[in-house]
Image (cartoon, rainbow, N blue to C red):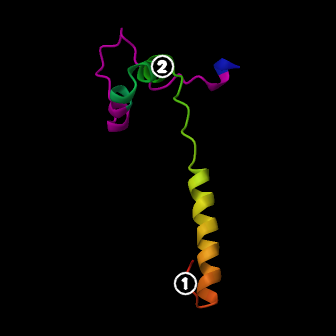
């Protein structure tokens, strides 16, 4: 199953004489986590995507609903 998810393009090859191009985001990845950079650029194993801010979104939605109720009644929030 690992072979299915493992990339083969854009990997660093130490035997290549061609210059290896890096994007700004890959440089930032190296600064943040050198091991993650190695896994990504040398072995083709991408970094796990971050979690969405679902708790923040839920709190924001609840607060907006509550304030909309008070606006409809033309009241201040207690």
Range of the magenta residues? 4-28
Q: Are marks 2 and 1 in contact (CB under 8 Å)?
A: no
Instruction: Determine whether 8 is above or below 70 in the image.
Output: above
Please, what is the dominant secondary structure of the magenta stretch?
Answer: loop
Taking depth in this image into account, of 54 and 16 the one nearest to the observer is 54
Left or right, 60 with reference to 24: right
Q: Quadrant of the N terminus?
A: top right
User: Is disc 1 placed on a helix, strand or loop?
Assistant: loop
Q: CA distance from mark 2 to mark 1?
A: 54 Å
Expressed as whole percent of the image width and height from the top left, the position of residue 56 reads 56, 55
| Residue behind mark 2 | 39
What residue sits 59% from the left and 58% below the top? 57
Expressed as whole percent of the image width and height from the top left, the position of residue 50 reads 54, 39
Give residue 76's mark.
1
Q: Quadrant of the C terminus?
A: bottom right
Give residue 24's mark.
none
Taking depth in this image into account, of 68 and 39 the one nearest to the observer is 68
Taking depth in this image into account, of 4 and 38 the one nearest to the observer is 38
* Residue 67 part of the magenta-drawn span: no
* Residue 9 part of the magenta-drawn span: yes
10 Å neighbourhood of mark 1: few (<14), some, or many (≥20)?
few
Q: Residue reaching furthest bottom?
A: 74
> In terms of sequence position, does the residue under pointer 2 or pointer 1 come before the other?
2
Expressed as whole percent of the image width and height from the top left, the position of residue 38 reads 42, 18
What residue sits 44% from the left and 26% below the top? 10
Q: Residue reaching furthest right?
A: 1
10 Å neighbourhood of mark 2: few (<14), some, or many (≥20)?
some
Left or right, 21 with reference to 37: left
């Amino acid at each position: 199953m690992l072979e299915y998810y493992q990339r083969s393009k854009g990997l660093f090859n130490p035997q290549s004489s061609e210059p290896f191009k890096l994007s700004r985001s890959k440089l930032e990845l190296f600064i943040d986590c050198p091991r993650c950079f190695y896994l990504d650029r040398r072995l083709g194993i991408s970094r796990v995507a971050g979690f969405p801010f679902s708790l923040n979104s839920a709190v924001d939605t609840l607060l907006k609903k509550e304030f909309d109720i008070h606006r409809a009644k033309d009241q201040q929030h207690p």
